[in-house]
Structures are given as C-alpha cells and as structure tokens.
Amino acid sequence: MCTAVTYKTEDFYFGRTLDYDLSYGEEVTITPRNYPFQFMDKGVVHSHYAIIGTAFVADNYPLYYDAVNEKGLAIAGLNFVDHAHYKEKAAGKDNIAPFEFIPWILCGCSTVRQARVLLEKMNFLNAPFNEKLPLALLHWIISDSSESITVEAVKEGIKIYENPVGVLTNNPPFDNQLFNLNNYLSLSPGPPENTFSPDLELKQYSRGMGALGLPGDLSSQSRFVRASFVKMNSVCEKGEKESVSQFFHILNSVDNQRGCCRLDNGNYEITIYSSCCNTNKGIYYYTTYDNHCITAVDMNRENLDSSQLVRYPLITGEQIQFQN
C-alpha cells in the first residue's frame, strides 16, 4: 500500500509513501548523466539526464521506486496487484521491463508530453530483473509542473489516464478511483449546513464537521480519497521550508502505523519512508518510520557528469532535539 502526491506552490513537489512490511535496504540514489543504463531489449544508453530518487541498488543497477530527473519530470511506481499485466516481446515495439520503465522515461524525457510519445511505442515486457527479484505488479504516476498522468499496463494494453488530482494509490484501476470521488462531493473544509431537514434544529458541535464522511481506514481507495481531499484543500506559504513541511503533512494524512495493518504472515505493514522532491531544484527530502527529522539530498551538489552511482543509505534512527 502506497500513496503518491504532487503539490505546487512557487516550485513543484512530488513524493510518495512506501508502505510495506519489510525494507530491501533502499537508498537515495543519484544516477549521473554518464552512468550506462543497460536495457534488456534496447541496449545501453550511455548519456542521459541525471536522476535522483529512492532505489534498491542490485548489481550496481538502481531499481527506482520513485525518481525525478534534472529537467523536473517525476515518476513513482505503486503496487497494482491483480490488475497489472505484462506481455511477451512484441515486434516493432520498445520492449521495456517494468523495472526499466522509470529510467527509460527519465533518461530522455523532460515533460509528460514527451513521455506520452514514448508510451505510444512501448510494450511492458514480462521479464524480471533476475530470478531472485520477481516481477513487481505496478502502475505509475508521471508528473511535471503542468500535468500528471497515470499509466496502467493491463490485459487490454497500456492505458493512460489524465490525473487531475495528482494523486495515486493502488487498487482499483485509476478510472474507478477517480469516479469514486463523486461519492464525496459534499465534503468541505468549511462548516456544514443543515440540509438534513428544515424541521430539525441540527447544529455543528465541533470544528471540522464539513469533512464528516472522509474515510479514515488504510485501504487504497480510502487513502486516495483522503489524500485527494487534503491535497486539494491544502493552504501553504510559497517558501521552501513551508512547502516541504506542508507536503509531509499531506503525506502524514495517509501514514500507516505499525499494528494497524496485520498481514497473513504476522508482519505489519508500515510507512517505511515518505519522500518529497523539489523538482525545480533537484532536492530530495525524506523521512522514515523511526526518523521524523526531514533529511535532504541535493543532486546538484554532486558531479552530475560522472558515470558512477551516488548512494545515500536512508537514516532510519529517530533524531530527537532536546530544548533544555
């Protein structure tokens, strides 16, 4: 279970929660412009845009969960179990495995419009990274400062949806998630009016009652509604610190606490990390479940013309500042 969100103040911000019951040792990973990306069916791309995001690095290959390139184009992949469908190699298509999709788009595209062009020629290849890392069943949100789309590879083919809320969770398919918002059109950040009956003197007894009915459970459909409501009604100053702080508050509205989602194996799903990237400045911020201090990695402080990955392990221990 994960949630991805976009947000715009003076700059454009993109991030997500990663909700799972275990960590693979993911790291904030910068892929410089001259790192050679090996694609299964498309050969090696030797030169490309620089990329920053969170990845599990396997055999020196960054398997990105979410990432942004130096031009400000952002992507996150989220679980899409029971719906994602990949195909065998197709002639005349760009056959791209799901684990290659984020770098394939970010290597050469600077806008969502350019990503659409690549998607028209793509086939999601039914091929894992290796035998120890099975295929992840995913769908994706792709965003720039002007628009967002959702990409889903299903049995019927690749579907591309306009994403006017700039939010993505998991199941059901995105068109159903978007339609479901109609059930909450009466929610409001303001005080409610009595439309129940003119014959009853009904009054609000608490602040915040305009949002009565906003779902509070951890299901993906409820998180989509909650994140959309919080994001669409968010009010924030335009400064960097204010924007980053507000972004994490939006993500915190769908935080997954240990103990609330028990799995069949006895483990608990938690929000392993939350991320926020200023796509204009290339600064990647994150928190982890046991570290609420916001940590930042600035891609522009690194040598972006290098050919070697730059890796920063996530700081997972809580950092508490005493005031006395």
Image (spheres, rainbow, N blue to C red):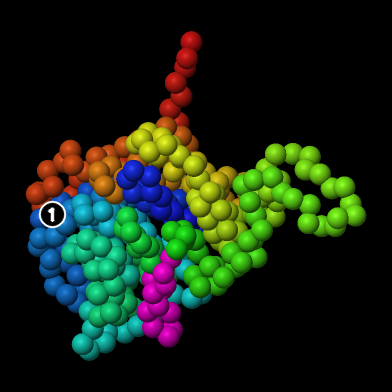
Is residue 174 shown to the viewer in this render?
yes
* Mark 1 lies on residue: 33
Which portion, as a residue range, is magenta?
150-163
Instruction: Point out residue 127 in the picture as x, y percentages from the top left corner.
Output: 31, 75
Q: Is residue 96 above or below residue 61?
A: below
Instruction: Point out residue 199 in the picture as x, y percentages from the top left corner.
Output: 90, 55
Q: In the current view of this chain or complex, which residue is farthest to the front?
A: 198
| Front-lying residue, 296 or 207 | 207
- Is residue 157 highlighted in magenta? yes
Is residue 227 shown to the viewer in this render?
no
Q: Looking at the rendering, which quadrant does residue 88 occupy?
A: bottom left
| Front-lying residue, 101 or 147 | 147
- Is residue 254 highlighted in magenta? no
Q: Amino acid at mark 1?
A: Arg
Q: In the current view of this chain or complex, which residue is farthest to the top?
A: 324
What is the total number of numbered labels drawn onto the structure image? 1
Q: Is residue 257 above or below residue 68?
A: above
**Quick one: label 1, few (<14), some, or many (20+) residues within 10 Å?**
many
211 left or right, relative to 150: right
Q: Main secondary structure of the magenta part?
A: strand
Residue at the spot 27% in from the left edge and 57% down from the top edge = 73
